[in-house]
Amino acid sequence: MRRLFESLSGMVKRESDPLGDPRTATNWMKDIRQQDIAGQLLAVREMIGRIEGREGISLHTLQSLFVIDEKIQPTFDQVKQQYIQNPRAGKAVEEKLWNEVVGFARAMLAAYHPFVRLEEPSPEEEAGFLQASGLMLARALHYVGIQVKWHYFRFQSPPATLWAAANQLYRLAELSGVDSHSFRLYSEQDSQTTSCTDEFIRIQMLATLNNGNFNLRQYDWADRWLMLWSRQVQVERKYREGVHQFCVNLGEPSGPAKIHEAIEGEMLRFWGVGELLAEMAKVISQLEAGDTPARLGLGDDARMPACLDFLRQLEILWSRERNQQLGRSERTKVSKLVQVTSGLSNIFTAIRFDDERAMLRSSARSAPDNDEVMDMKLYGYVTDRTKQKLAMAQARNHAYVNKAKTIDHDEWIVENQSAGGFGAVLPLEGHDWVRLGVLLALRNHEQDSWMIAVIRRLNRINGEQLYAGVQILSSTPVASSMKSLEPERAVSMSAVEGIDTVGLTLPKSGLYIPYLGEGKRANTLLIHSADYAPGRLYQVTARDKIFVVRIGEILEKGPDWIWAMIELMRRDA
């Protein structure tokens, strides 16, 4: 009886063990799905965490892990999308979501690790393990890719351990002869097939974008598009001149490198992007002809023209010929402080103060000086009236200085500079607003005029510091006030009772920026995004000069600003 009881107890225990067989894992996941998102992820992490210390892992254990991994994907995708769709969430929310995504990916990668390193499965399970090895290694690579991607979202370089894991997993796929086996990674939700090579090349190609120039949404687009294009990239063991552009050393804990000369090595793997660029060129051509990103499989959230602009950026970045033609001005190491202010209102005000100071100085130089000369010629001395005019001009200049000092600004430590910009190191604390495409006004000293610049590159140095690459757009911007010549309602009817506001327009602010493009000078305006409309007519006042201009094509756009070409229609004064 005792033996029978122990036997029955063992059977019940195995039946209740989600890692015992796929059927039990399926039933367990049905129960888990009744919990909230956080509860589901926590329960799965706790369950798969038992694999490492499990006595004797079997093929059934791996198959159960496959089931749990498959069934949790919709929930895990919700958390990932919540992070991606809220790029400006508060620091606490961002930290929580980032840790949930990366923590879960780490746990899954660790769960697959005992099977990856399993050298001698039992003879009766050897064939089953071999058959499952392709999917096992591809999923492990997939979780490495998620961690790499989420580090890029934070402008961080992935740790060497992730590169070591990616390279070792791909090497094992080669040795097992399953690197090119094709299958759906998650059969219940994936329509596209993949392979270990596809997952590996996605990680490597995404790494070629890690120059700090792209935002979260662009990284996500590129990663998803690489699922479509990875088949156009062939990984080879021998370098071919004119074909291969990148390489990676599978024996080193490092990512891809650009090839500058012929190299050889047993652990080196090479690939080119010629076929990928050809595929991208087709997509770009179809979009230019009026096709939609969604119909081309680029995703429902890919919108024009941002989608097309980003594709063109990728084309330039991945094209060997274009990359070789791109020149960069020489950078020199420095150590200095610059004053920085942000926010369009602050920037427009800062530039306006500079213009007022310039006009006051011009007025003070011309009028009082001329009056003093005339007084000396007529009377032999400077009259009280002229002295009063000079004092008033000086008072206005002092008023400007006091007013200009009220502009809130930060001080950044510049560590390198070039003809077109600089690189600065700043603390993470208090700089959550620092993002790609944010407009800045900056100057070296209080006596200097403000320049217009934009953040082009971001890299997180460590847990406390951030590196920002800044490009100067103009050192001579001019503040402008604008009035639309088209009827528009400036304020709501309820804002001013009893007054008809139809046809009234509020003054708008902008910056006139001289622009040199294709060897020709052009007129441009930098304005609020909400004020842009192609073809709209504005009456623009800049330094007491009045023009009527027509808004033209967009040169560049940021989170809240647009830099556009303008056509001068006439000068009113």
Image (cartoon, rainbow, N blue to C red):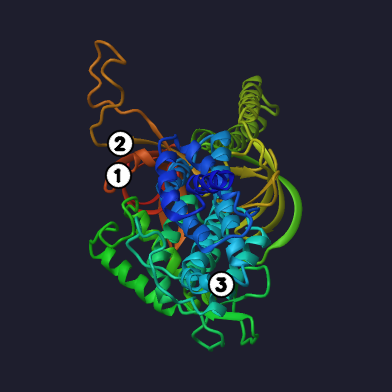
**Residue 459: which disc?**
none
Residue type, label 2: Ser
Q: Secondary structure at mark 2?
A: strand
Residue 412 drawn at (x, y percent): 69, 44
Of the two numbered discs 1 and 3 on the same chain, state the one appearing first in sequence. 3
> Residue furthest toward the top?
498
Which quadrant would the N terminus be assigned to in this image?
A: top right
> Element at badge 3?
helix
What residue occupies the far front of the structure in this picture? 1
User: Does residue 254 appear in this view?
Assistant: yes
In the rendered image, residue 432, in percent from the top left (x then y), is placed at 59, 39
Q: CA distance from mark 1 to mark 3?
A: 50 Å
**In the picture, residue 112 is in which quadrant?**
bottom right
Identified at 26% across, 67% down, the residue is 286
Image quarter for residue 46?
Answer: top right
Residue holding disc 1? 533
Q: Nearer the viewer, mark 2 or mark 1?
A: 1
Residue at the spot of label 2 = 484
Q: Secondary structure at mark 1?
A: loop
Question: Toward the viewer: 560 or 523?
Answer: 560
Q: Which residue is mark 3?
A: 170
Label pair 2/3, CB-CB below 8 angstroms: no
Residue 435 visible (yes or no) = no
Q: Earlier in the sequence, mark 2 or mark 1?
A: 2
Q: How far across and down, in percent of the image, does residue 121 sit?
A: 58, 70
Say if mark 2 contacts mark 1, CB within 8 Å: no
Real-space CA distance between mark 2 and mark 1, rounded to the nearest whole angstrom:
11 Å
> Amino acid type of disc 1?
Ala
